[in-house]
Image (cartoon, grey):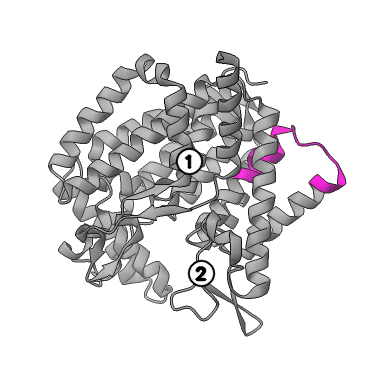
Amino acid sequence: MIRRIKLIEYYFVILLLFLLPTQLAYHFWPPWSFVFGIRIDLLSPSIYFTDLLVLILVALNLEIIKKYKKYFCLILVFAFINSFFSALPLLSLYKWLKIVEFVFVIIYFVQVKAISLSLLVNTLFYSLVFFSLIGIAQFVNRGTVGGILYYLGERSFSQSTPGIALIALNGVEYMRAYSTFSHPNSLAGFLGAGILFVLLSGKLKKNFFNILGVFLILTCFVLSFSLSSYLGIFFVFSFYLFSKNKNIFTKLVLVSFFVFMLSSLLFPVISPWVLNNFSKIGQNIVQRIDLAYISGQMIGQRFLIGQGLGTFIANIPTYKGIYTYSWLLQPVHNIFLLIFSEIGVFGLLAFYFLVSKTLKTLVKYRRLYLLLSLIYLLFTGLFDHYSLTLQQNLLLFSIFIGISFRAKIA
């Protein structure tokens, strides 16, 4: 009986890993999910199919909850305090329940013994190939594929849909690849971290079909036209050049993470100077800088406990930006500022210590495939928020953190 349960669990883990890129979900639309009458996905409580798979793993591993109950209790206590002072307490409570879910995912992948590195690599690789094919087909089709892909979370849109992400090539506009993600940048972030993990692990067999698969993943990555992801890959491979010298590499990793956080926290302070002295920068960059400035105001008002998890977008209209973009209904495009804004300095320090410990563990055991994947996610997190706000990217981030603490994985 126990053996049969473990076999069932094994297949659910494989299914979860393969379906990580999906965004099939049922959304609820309470009044707080509307701002200026506009329906905001990130403010909508949602039940994803991958949530159900995680819930099944929870039901099959209740002993994990009992073993680490002090950590879950600590999170729930802080969640109550943060939500109590939130402008939208119910929304913050829902977001904290999601955090509890992702903490379980981290702990589960620390504990799980049946999933080998080879199985992790191959399952994620086949998933990346499959969902990259969807993105490539969308680019060629200049719109979504449709049909059964709806049940994997592919949204219905075309090149002429208002607000769709486009790229001009030789004077001709093309729709950037989305696959089953809500934006090409989040797709690129997922593909970039995933392909680094797969290729650097050394567990992928070198044959024609796998080489073709890598080519398809890289093609879709390029067709996302995500500048921050391109820079992330360049940054990671420049890191790789120092990896043979352990002392230098260790210092470089830890100093870089500290610089990431420090530069992020200084950005709201220098935002007015940047906008006043670089007037010719693109409108998209101006908007991101203005969001950083607004985040600085939020931090100043609620330094210790934050504005409330998940409430950044809802709070934007109550603050004045440099250019007063109150209609910019997006989170700040920086994961460190987003954490600080929503859950305060205590939440930011908890994130810093968790990631620092993870990086030190990976350097100690020389697991470059995970280390460079996480550095990539942290680097792209300087320019976007999806690693902490979108289901697919946050699940991947949580799994990478989890398997990082397995001293030996075979």
**Residue position for label 1:** 395
Was residue 152 drawn as part of the magenta stretch in this picture?
no
- Image quadrant in which you'd find residue 170: bottom right
Q: Position of residue 409 (x, y in %)?
A: 63, 21
Kindly identify the amino acid type of the residue bearing the numbered disc 1.
Answer: Leu
Front-lying residue, 249 or 385: 385
Crowding near the residue tagged with mark 1, few <14, some 14–19, many ≥20 C-alpha atoms within 10 Å: many
- Image quadrant in which you'd find residue 224: bottom right
Q: Is residue 277 left or right of residue 373?
A: left
**Residue position for label 2:** 156
Front-lying residue, 142 or 81: 142
Q: Secondary structure at mark 2?
A: loop
Quadrant for the N terminus in the image: top right
Q: Secondary structure at mark 1?
A: helix
- State whether residue 224 appears in this view: no
- Image quadrant in which you'd find residue 178: bottom right
Which residue does the image show at 68% across and 59% down from the upper left? 133
Kindly identify the amino acid type of the residue bearing the numbered disc 2.
Answer: Ser
Magenta stretch: give its range.
Answer: 194-210
Q: Is residue 154 left or right of residue 338?
A: right
Front-lying residue, 305 or 255: 305
Q: Position of residue 198 (x, y in %)?
A: 68, 39
In the rendered view, tell whether residue 204 sits above or below residue 131: above
Q: Is residue 37 left or right of residue 281?
A: left
Quadrant for the C terminus in the image: top right
In the rendered view, tell whether residue 148 sits above or below residue 99: below
Which residue does the image show at 26% across and 23% down from the upper left? 73
The circle drawn on residue 127 is: none
Front-lying residue, 385 or 240: 385
